[in-house]
Amino acid sequence: MAEEHATDKDTLPEDSKRPEDSQEPTDLHTYLETLLKRAKSATRPLSVLTTSVKNHALHAMADSLERECEAILAANQQDLEAFDVSGGREAMADRLTLTAERVAEMAAGIREIAALRDPVGESLGFRERPNGMRVGRVRVPIGVIGIIYESRPNVTADAAALCLKSGNACVLRGGSEAIHSNRAIAGVLSAAAQKAGIPEGAIAFIDRPDRELVLELLKQQAYIDVIIPRGGESLMRTVTEHSTIPVIKHDKGVCHIYVDADADVDMAKRICLNAKVQRPSTCNAMETLLVHQSMARSLLPALGRELIEAQVEIRGCPKTCALIPEAKPATEDDYGREFLARILAVKVVKDMEQAMEHIETYGSRHTEAIITNDYMRALRFLREVDASAVMVNASTRLNDGYQFGLGAEIGISTTRIHARGPMGLEDLTCAKYLVYGSGQIRE
């Protein structure tokens, strides 16, 4: 699923007691080192498992999630009872909540991953050198992947399944607000995987939410090959400032839709309503709507009514407020802000050039879209707008691993190095060179 973000409180949770039945050492450093050594030792046997073994384990994990649904929901209820929804944290509460349907969706997602092509061992091409030596590359697992994420318990299932299918061990560190849910899910998945032949330690979950563990985890370059944080600005800042391990960032989503001069009005209304309302708490939801001045009068009053009926608060420029009386005047801070709620910033622009300048200034390079019937302007928008995904006549909500045919995603990367956009199985591999010789030496 598309990435959703944490608050400052999620980044470094407060200390809490370990479960009474835990047999792990109480010393934080010893606890973390023991867990990481197990994960590291699992990488070699995991990397050479056959596709059939991995798929068998994935199906066993999905089956176990469904069997243990009641226990998982009971653990989730503990988290929900302790969660404070005050201070505009309703979106996070929605992401934290599990239902029987959502557990079933997690299981279905794991089965979809099992059905995907295994990238490990895929040839990336060979060529013969003048001396007769054959040189090529193949996909291989990265190794140990550390994932730091926030309140969404389904990330635990998605991340574990994706890492297993791509031959990686994973070290999962969820937010304290979902500790009971994540612990239950990780326990079910790990037990099922081991029973199906996956090495111990391949699915490692840090079930101690102690504050110090995050910072220490970020220094474990001897055991972890890459860190993938999923959350808001505070989490990203903490990880990038303190990590000695390479980081693939999954940053905030300040997503725009620009409605061009000759856009189809009905299509524009349908797309914009979906992009804002279908699930506002996601990182690929539209946060700012830009409308060409020649389209404003025919689009904004009708669209504004539909958005208001959907309980969306509109914060607009003066022209927008004139066309939508219920709109509040937008401040400078409203542009470039990730609301993750039923709030939308709207601005009327004079042309596509001004729209692209606005996106360049305020966007987060996540997802940007244009609604237009002009082929050349669509091509220009695709070419010139910088984001992990740029769309024509489609909702920003479609920037998602499932929607792109990748199966579950580890998140939506906003970085440029190694992977960008929804990260599926291929993005959890790297390459190594294979060289076939017949006695060649370097002269």
Image (cartoon, helix red, strand yellow):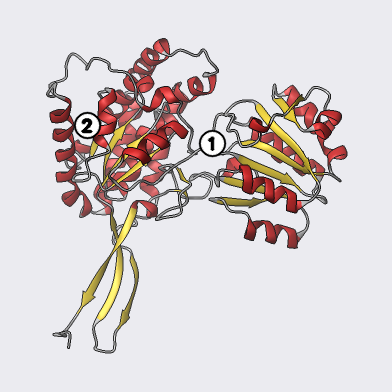
* Amino acid identity at mark 2: Ala
Q: Quadrant of residue 144?
A: top left
What is the distance, in whole Å, between disc 2 and disc 1 at their CAs?
32 Å
In this rendering, position of residue 331 left or right of residue 351:
left
Q: Which residue is tagged 2?
A: 191
Between 58 and 12, the one lying in front of the other is: 12
Circle 1 sits in a helix, a strand or a loop, which is it? loop
Disc 2 packing (10 Å; few <14; some 14–19; many ≥20)? some
Point out residue 429 in the picture as x, y percentages from the top left corner.
Answer: 33, 55
Q: Position of residue 64 (x, y in %)?
A: 30, 30
Q: Is the residue 300 above or below the residue 373 in the image?
A: above
Mark number, residue 203: none
Tell me if 26 is positioned left or right of 73 in this view: left
- Is residue 232 among the parts visible in the rendering? no
- Furthest toward the top, the residue is 81
Q: Residues within 10 Å of mark 1 (few under 14, many from 20)?
A: many
In the depicted view, which residue is nearer to us: 37 or 361? Answer: 361
Would residue 57 appear left or right of 87 to someone viewing this image? Answer: left
Where in the figure is residue 248, as x and y percent of width and height? 39, 46
Q: Residue at x 67, y 33 (%)?
A: 332
Q: Quadrant of residue 124?
A: bottom left
- Please report whichever mark, 2 or 1, sits nearer to the chain's N-terminal start: 2
The quadrant in which residue 145 appears is top left
Looking at the image, is 170 positioned above or below residue 121? Answer: above
Amino acid type, mark 1: Cys
Contact check, label 2 and label 1, Cβ < 8 Å: no
Along the viewing direction, whichever of 190 and 371 lies nearer the viewer: 371
Dot 1 corresponds to which residue? 283
Mark 2, secondary structure of its residue: helix
Quarter that holds the C terminus: bottom left
Q: Give me the residue at 16% from left, 16% from top.
A: 21
